[in-house]
Amino acid sequence: PDFERDSDVGGLAPTFVYDSRDNIFTPVSGTYIEATAWFCDQALGGDNDFQHVQVVVLQYVPLASKWFLGLRADGTASFGDEPFYALPYISLRGVAAMRYQGEQVAQLETELRWQFWKRFSLLGFAGYGGAWNDFERVENSQTVFSGGTGFRYELAREYGIHAGIDVGFS
């Protein structure tokens, strides 16, 4: 097919957000829900006409005095003439970005964090995602498992800001 170097995407993306988390940096309890619908069209300055819908749900639960559980569910679907670089893709820790793309993507991830000593914590995480191109042919999907571990240090107690590093695999 003909190759064009220039590509413009123009559109509107209304978003609904519900957030009851106790902290936006490193939450230990609460819910976050975000639903976004992109409407991209040539009339709005883009080269392609397509739609993109995404719903993200995060849930944080304190399990014990120093144990915290985080859950994530994410689903995305695209419709129309979407350029390849704007297709939904599996976005999990330990999975190469944009490696698993499709018109529809669903993913689940969980994280367990243990605040083991003063400002230090360890965590483990696992995830599963799938990408496919036709709602009626999900058996042709690409799927991937991921997992790993991480370390966190609490930089600012007053704000609940933790920094750290994760090592993941898939």
Image: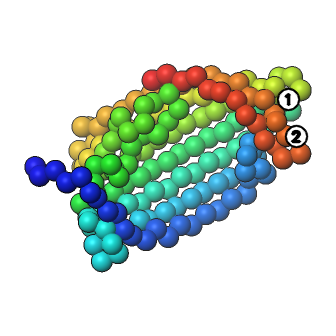
| Picture residue at 55% right of the left edge, 36% below the top | 109
Between 66 and 78, the one nearer to me in the picture = 78
Q: Are marks 2 and 1 in contact (CB under 8 Å)?
A: yes
| Picture residue at 84% right of the left edge, 47% below the top | 159
The first of marks 2 and 1 along the sequence is 1
Residue 157's disc is 2
| Picture residue at 79% right of the left edge, 51% below the top | 22
x and y percentages locating residue 91 in the rendered image: 47, 40
Q: Residue furthest bottom?
A: 43
Q: Residues within 10 Å of mark 2 (few under 14, many from 20)?
A: few
Left or right placement of residue 109 versus residue 24 in this view: left
* Amino acid at pointer 1: Arg
Residue at image mark 1: 119
* Amino acid at pointer 2: Arg
Query: As displayed, is residue 108 above or below residue 32?
Result: above
Between 89 and 18, the one nearer to me in the picture = 89
x and y percentages locating residue 46 in the rendered image: 31, 68
Q: Quadrant of residue 132?
A: top left
Q: Residues within 10 Å of mark 1 (few under 14, many from 20)?
A: few
> Could one spot residue 157 in this view of the protein?
yes
> Could one spot residue 135 in this view of the protein?
no
Left or right placement of residue 106 versus residue 101 in this view: right
Q: Secondary structure at mark 1?
A: loop
Left or right placement of residue 21 versus residue 126 in this view: right
Q: Residue furthest left?
A: 1
Q: CA distance from mark 2 to mark 1?
A: 8 Å
Q: Quadrant of residue 101?
A: top left
Between 146 and 25, the one nearer to me in the picture = 25
x and y percentages locating residue 72 in the rendered image: 57, 43
Q: Secondary structure at mark 2?
A: loop
x and y percentages locating residue 70 in the rendered image: 66, 39
In the rendered image, which quarter contains the C terminus?
A: top left
